[in-house]
Amino acid sequence: MADATPLYDTYARAPLRFERGEGVWLVAEDGTRYLDFAAGVAVNSLGHAHPHLVSALKDQADKVWHLSNLYEIPGQESLSRRLTEATFADKVFFTNSGAEALECAIKTARRYHFSKGHPEKFHIITFEGAFHGRTLATIAAGGQAKYLEGFGPKAPGFYQVPFNDMPAVKAAITEETAAILIEPIQGEGGIRMVSKEFLQELRSLCDEYGLLLILDEVQCGIGRTGKLFAYEWAGITPDIMAVAKGIGGGFPLGACLATAEAAFGMIAGTHGSTYGGNPLAMAVGNAVLDVVLADGFLQHVRDVALVFRQGLASLADRFPDIIEEIRGDGLMLGIKARVPSADLLKAIRAERLLAVPAGENVIRLLPPLVTTAEEAREGLSRLERAAEQLTVERRKASA
């Protein structure tokens, strides 16, 4: 019997088809409007059809789409300079995705120690519950059995320790350890926050043992926490950082940022990407930074985040049988549910609100950074109606 679709069966897609977007709204084929607090899993940082991004893409499309890195690409020079001026980094490598940015980060760390005369240093300490991508290396880095199963032996060189467990980190360091890799906020793992103190201790530990600190800010970067990057809240800097998602505002774009010292071993021929840093991506990435780095924009994110936090705290107080805990920072928020998260997500969608499931029975709210306070309150109203409906259903079931 022929399959119903020629697509791989790797996604459990919701039966929704959208034909256009407008800001924080998505419009389905039947005209139904949905408030999009999924944002393509934190990708559509400036919402849908943002005029500045649309203009930048159209203008570049009339010039040149692809050149490859055989030649100099002015957009790369511009975007990399802006990223280094705004961060800890001295060097940038552009990719097409977060997984590729993580692959580059891992290779950069290993190559650093190799170039310093220590090829034995290639092990990287990671944390339980992490998600770093879907390649063979990044699923090994994440270490989650559900992503590793069926794909052969786990790629060597990664050692997972419990989340937020400093004694375990210290015990895991050996003569073969090259780096420590961590998400400042675990997204897929359930919007689990790494404390500022823990990040500060990791920085000190890396300095003490000559290790590189790698941050995965693929989901929490580019303004999502109210600062350009989440590490800024802890007052530390990494040696290497992977970013993607929001930096392209919906266009496939990622980047690996590093200090000059950390990128020491990445010389000509050691790494490459056919599409990474192509002119279309660079035009859009620069346009995203035009908006995110504009005066007042990150303050706007912090202001709207406060509306969300206050509203969600109120909902948690009023619906304790539905909501166990509110997690996260900025516009990267999680609702840990007492009911099955799939039931909560279904109820939310019934109210024409889109969100994202995560680990630990959590629903992620990842609204575009351009969400207004009024739109935040509208989303909270829809969440309230969803919680009320679930409460009614639970009462009926127990009657």
Image (spheres, rainbow, N blue to C red):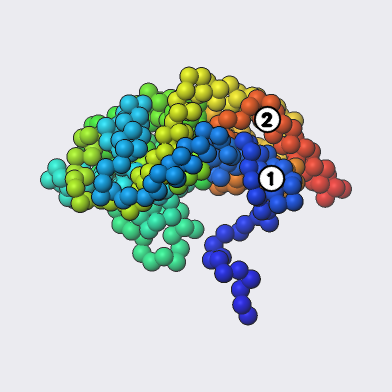
> Label 1 neighbourhood size at 10 Å, few (<14), some (14-19), many (20+)?
some
Q: Is residue 213 visible?
A: no
Q: In which quarter of the image is residue 265?
A: top left
- Disc assigned to residue 375: 2
- Left/right of residue 313 with respect to residue 127 in the rendered view: right
- In the displayed structure, 359 sits above or below 154; it is above
Q: Which of marks 1 and 2 is nearer the N terminus?
A: 1
Q: Judging from the image, what secondary structure is the residue with disc 2 in?
A: helix
Which amino acid type corresponds to the residue marked 1 in the rendered image?
Val
Q: Nearer the viewer, residue 220 or 17?
A: 17
What residue would you read off at disc 1?
27
Work out which quarter of the rendered image holds the N terminus and state it: bottom right
Look at 45% across and 28% down and name the residue there. Answer: 290
Look at 64% across and 46% down and name the residue there. Answer: 20
- In the displayed structure, 211 sits above or below 68; it is above
Whether residues under marks 1 and 2 lie with C-beta atoms below 8 angstroms apart, the answer is no
Look at 30% across and 57% down and name the residue there. Answer: 156
Query: Which residue appears farthest toward the bottom when viewing the image?
Result: 1
Q: How far is disc 1 from disc 2 in space, using C-alphas? A: 16 Å
Which amino acid type corresponds to the residue marked 2 in the rendered image?
Glu
Q: Judging from the image, what secondary structure is the residue with disc 1 in?
A: strand
